[in-house]
Image: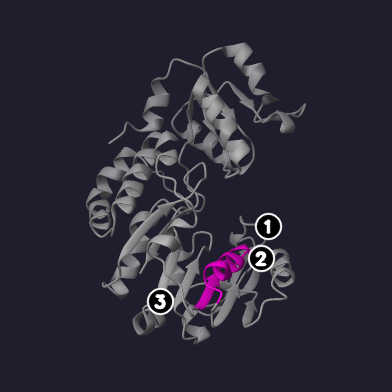
Amino acid sequence: MEKELWSYLKTAQKPIVLYGMGNGADKIINTLNFFGIEFQGVFASDGFVRNKLFHGHKICSYSELKEKFGDMIVLLCFGSSLPEVIENIKKIASEQELYAPEVPVIGGGLFTKKYYDVQKQNFDFVRSKLADEISVKTFDNILKYKLSGKIDYLLDCEVSPDEPYNSFLKLQNENFIDLGAYNGDTVAGFIGHCPDYRQITAVEPDKKTFKKLQTNTEDISNITLINACVSDKCGMLPFGSKGGRNSSLSQDGDMLKSITVDSLKTDTSFIKMDVEGEEVGAILGAKETIIKNKPKMLISAYHRTDDFIKIPQTVLDIRNDYKIYMRHFKYLPAWDTNFYFI
């Protein structure tokens, strides 16, 4: 297994600089501070360079810090799937040591060597349940990435979003539940692969995004839209609306209706879960549906540090006859990584 990034950075001789600002950079700075690691600069893409400070450092361009430091260690502090952004990251990586530190999107806990060693038996169990070579390679590569921060492991296991549908996710006449439907993009993708669907139920908690979902699906037939969050119980939960994919359950949020998959009482055959770190709760709230129908499931596995363990274990505790696949699509860092239960 790869050497842990944080341990390496503690002994690194080159200046460490951050690429990007915002929430991701805040999390990485907090982690650097925790380990007693200093950074010497911050840069942004040319269109985002501003004459202001970020954590006490002037926001520079890459070329400015390159001229100042020469060789340096670059820590990627944001996520993107845009081809032009990824190409620029690759270009910088060809000139400097570049890492994309693994910090959880939701919740705490770092993926460290100590964490891996403690959980190795659980990781080995999940790995043994994976159904094909691409899944095993994806699992192995992302674990190596999580420890080392090296983006080559992610680039090496990317597949096209169409690959699962062409390989093992055969859709026909489905009753689809989309949990975390966002603005309707995954509904449109589903219809493209399953035009003969029976019914769609799209659940989106963020109010602003829900309005976009309504607009983008108004010409779609046999679809039900629900403005709610998903959990293991029905009721009301505090939800922080941010008008995008970062919206999630939050103690500082407003109270919002919470539902379970089981409460929908639909004869579902396919479920997609991308619910910003609440996937385990959503699975538990679908227990009766899973036992009765054994629906195909696509479940995001990149929000929490323990997703690679907790998600498959939770599903297999309900039904142990699922085949499990794993795929990673083009994204830096390791977002857009999914488990598939067939």
- Range drawn in magenta: 175-195
The Cα–Cα distance between marks 2 and 1, rounded to whole angstroms, is 7 Å
Residue type marked 3: Pro
Instruction: Please give left or right for residue 186 compared with residue 302 in the image.
Output: right
> Label 3 belongs to which residue?
295
Q: Is residue 266 magenta?
A: no
Q: Which is more toward the observer, 190 or 239?
A: 190
Mark in front: 3 vs 1: 3
Residue type marked 1: Lys
Q: Earlier in the sequence, mark 3 or mark 1?
A: 1
108 vs 61: above or below: below
Give how far across and how far down residue 221 sits, in percent.
65, 81
Q: Quadrant of residue 280?
A: bottom left
> Label 1 belongs to which residue?
242
Q: Secondary structure at mark 2?
A: loop
The Cα–Cα distance between marks 3 and 1, rounded to whole angstroms, is 31 Å
Q: Earlier in the sequence, mark 2 or mark 3?
A: 2
Q: Are marks 2 and 1 in contact (CB under 8 Å)?
A: yes
Q: Which is more toward the observer, 114 or 202?
A: 202
Q: Is residue 176 magenta?
A: yes
Q: Quadrant of residue 141?
A: top left
Q: Which is more toward the observer, 14 or 143?
A: 143
92 vs 284: above or below: above
The crowd level at tag 3 (other Cα within 10 Å; few <14, some 14-19, many 20+) is many
> Label 2 belongs to which residue?
206
The crowd level at tag 1 (other Cα within 10 Å; few <14, some 14-19, many 20+) is some
Say whether residue 149 is visible. no
Q: How many marks?
A: 3
The Cα–Cα distance between marks 2 and 3, rounded to whole angstroms, is 26 Å
Q: Quadrant of residue 26?
A: top right
Q: Secondary structure at mark 1?
A: loop
